[in-house]
Amino acid sequence: MTTEARSETFQRFAQSVAGKRPDDRESVDVEALLALEKEERRAAEQMLIERIAADDWRAPPALALAECRGAVMPMKRALAGDASGRMKVAIALALEKLEAIDKADPIVADVLREGDPDSGLAAVVAAEEMKSPEIRDALAWSCLNHPSRTVRVSAGANLFYMAGLAEDPMAMDFRPIYIDLGEDDPAVRRRAFEQICDIVGMPPEVAG
């Protein structure tokens, strides 16, 4: 059956997968996906599964929300293959939601340590709700070593949030401290990081 012969809801979903509209660049139309039934739902899920091989990081979260178990193995294959860092983060979170892995934390931590600016932003956002030692250590490493100043600064803010000293991951009360992680001078970053460690009760050595 052609897309044109399907329901208006399916066509709206398919249009979002094509990603030509500005609103569709960050996510597909999940509302439309979840409204589909039977054969159209299966066809829509298959459309998303095919996007996994294209490194489309919008697909995994939508498949997880649809509780699509058929996407687990394709996502695991992509994770073990040449998926981009941003895609790895999306897959890890989806697999955790589908209970196909214990937790996404180790994968998110690895992506942070890869040092890629684009992937690092996705990873540091994902890390906001994670409290594990591997995430803490990866955030600490990022504070000093990540090439993206945005990731370094965000990692520092996250450490205050992780320690329960801030109400949200922005940790604005501590901005005068962690903002120096954005400086080019490694010595300035080191001083800021050591201040953070002193406040949150973390040994500086965890940064590696």
Image (tube, rainbow, N blue to C red):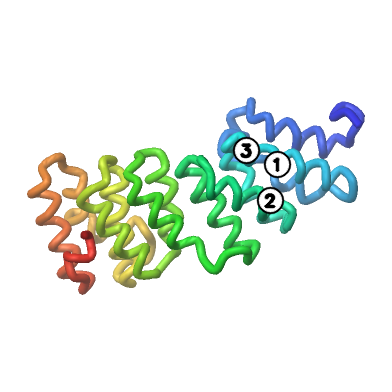
Measure the alpha-carbon separation of dots 1 and 2. Answer: 7 Å
Q: Are marks 1 and 2 in contact (CB under 8 Å)?
A: yes
Classify 2 as above or below 134.
Answer: above
Mark sitting earlier along the chain (1/2): 1
Give the number of the mark in front: 2 or 3: 3
Viewport quadrant of the C terminus = bottom left
- Residue that label 1 marks: 48
Q: Are marks 3 and 1 in contact (CB under 8 Å)?
A: no
The image quarter containing residue 129 is bottom left
Q: Is residue 196 left or right of residue 94?
A: left
The image quarter containing residue 162 is bottom left
Measure the alpha-carbon separation of dots 2 and 3. Answer: 14 Å
Mark sitting earlier along the chain (3/1): 1
Identify the residue at horizontal 32%, vertical 58% (top origin): 138
Answer few, some or many: residues within 10 Å of disc 1's Cα (few below 14, many 20 plus, some between 14 and 19): many
Identify the residue at horizontal 81%, vertical 33% (top origin): 11
Identify the residue at horizontal 76%, vertical 42% (top origin): 46
- Helix, strand or loop under label 3: loop
Identify the residue at horizontal 20%, vertical 51% (top origin): 144
The residue at the far left in this view is 187
Front residue of 124 and 74: 74
